[in-house]
Amino acid sequence: MARNIADLFEHAVDAFPDRSAVACAERVVTFAELERDANRLAHHLSGRGIGPGDHVGLYARNSIEAIQTMLAAYKLRAVPINVNYRYVEDELRYLFDNADLVALVHDREFADRVAAVRADAPGLRTVLATEDLATATAGEPAERAFGERSPDDHYVLYTGGTTGQPKGVVWRHEDVWRVLGGGIDFVSGEPLPDEWAQSRAGAQGGGLTRLACAPLIHGAAQWAALPALFGGDLVVLVPKFDPHEVWRAVARHSVRVVTITGDAMARPLIEAYRDGGYDASSLVAISSHAALFSPSVKQEYLDTLPGVVITDAIGSSESGFNGLGMVAAQSAPGGDGPRVNPGPSTVVIDEANRPVRPGEVGRIARGGHVPLGYYKDPVKSASIFVTVDGARYVVPGDYGRLEQDGTLTLLGRGNMCVNTGGEKVFPEEVEGALKSHPDVFDALVIGVPDELLGQRVAAILQPRPDRVVDFDALDAHVRKRIAGYKVPRTMWTVEQVGRSPSGKPDYRWARDHAQRHAPDWRAAPSATAAR
């Protein structure tokens, strides 16, 4: 039993070849058609010397060809590498070198960038445009004809790099399948009995239709799409995130489940739904992954789509799935992050690697199936693993509070924490409070230097269209929701907050903006002194 991503997909092909597999824009392919095209591309790459362990970059927006490329690489026991389509030349040079790419599949719109850096990537010997795949592979065999695979084959996901240089997180196929691909039941925590369980269950049912809003360069989209394919569901993609196009796709394909990444997608989606009069009668669930889904935005969904189940999952590239929450009506308009039921083997530990008590804050750690480490960085790899009660856990840096009822509240990344006068402030909590104000569409919170406090809390705000932020009113609003020392003392407004294509916050952009621009508002000295 290989428990390998390619094998899991092929089991689905064998179980329901004529079922629709992926839809994007106006095109829909069946499992058999996707299998045929992936096999042809795999044979083409193999003919160019690409095989087990080789790294194949994917530099593309969402498309059926992007899914085809990922599957083709896995069939060869090669490793697809996600390349952010926003990267410019210097970032591409770094990634191509760090990831040791030997092949690259890219959208034609990025051809000039690829050409500009290719001379600096001597190991990159094969480059193909997604638009040319059908022509390039037309004469290749459509059959599998590949060797046996292993659960030890590597899956690599490069982090977004919003807090530093991107790093490749390396997983074994079986481990990442267990954690993110449905190999462990998300609700019960029980492992599936074998690698055919998902395709077997999919053959017995009709399959759901799932729409992944995030780009496939992000793990949230990859692990919305892959387990759906393993179980025979139709995966719907939009080439790039457009809230109106998402709702049109929901109606066109009778989508049942939509996956998003936090407020950056949730807020424009719900506002587009209210403005556009779209048919969402097929929708039964919306699930947020990998980014802040604040209480005020959740409440908008509960009010607007009362018959739809809202779920909130937390995790990271390094830890995978940490917890899942079913979102109900909010009892208080606080600024806290997602509150979820911890996943299997998830604990909260203190600085001495001991489990914390209920009500305490600590680092989120997950045991069981964990990654091998960062690609080519043994020192950084060693820093994210600890021993808890004799077992190995991964600790990527997320902090959370263990609640009295056993649930877990995500507070944010420790390296983004603001230390103001000795008090720790997690940006996500403050951002949630700011975005609960009707004038604020989006917000990022950072720490800026302060002679008295070391750091003071600062915020960069994106107002709603045609709104002007009343800073004093916003200050009073936030003080009713979070403690005074957490309230921003300095604020800027911008046309658009910096975020990655998946919606994750770009704190490097925020710090740079704060350094280069005078603030639009400062708290009165008395408020600053009172903290």
Image (cartoon, rainbow, N blue to C red):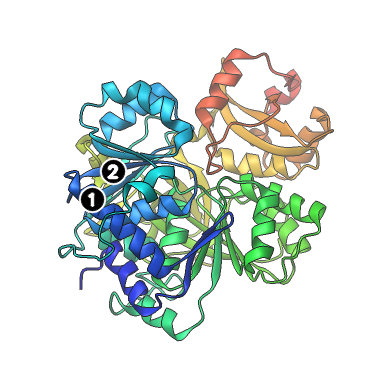
**Location of residue 482 in the rendering, given as x and y in whole percent from the top left corner:** 68, 43
Q: Is residue 355 left or right of residue 466?
A: left
Q: What number is the disc on residue 336?
A: none
Q: Nearer the viewer, residue 46 or 282?
A: 46
Image: 504 above or below 305: above
Element class at badge 2: strand
Residue that mark 2 sits on: 56
**Location of residue 444 in the rendering, given as x and y in whole percent from the top left corner:** 61, 34
Image: 290 above or below 18: above
Q: Nearer the viewer, residue 292 or 531?
A: 292
Q: Residues within 10 Å of mark 2 (few under 14, many from 20)?
A: many
Q: What number is the disc on residue 78?
A: 1
Q: CA distance from mark 1 to mark 2?
A: 7 Å
Instruction: Locate residue 202: give its quadrant.
Output: bottom left
Image: 396 above or below 144: above
Quick check: can you spot residue 350?
A: no
Quick check: can you spot residue 110?
A: yes
Instruction: Locate residue 228: give its quadrant.
Output: bottom left
Element class at badge 1: loop
Amino acid under label 2?
Val
Q: Are marks 1 and 2 in contact (CB under 8 Å)?
A: yes
Image quarter of the C terminus: top right
- The residue at 34%/48% (across/down) is 395
Q: Is residue 448 left or right of residue 333?
A: left
Instruction: Locate residue 342: give its quadrant.
Output: bottom left
Q: Nearer the viewer, residue 26 or 12?
A: 26
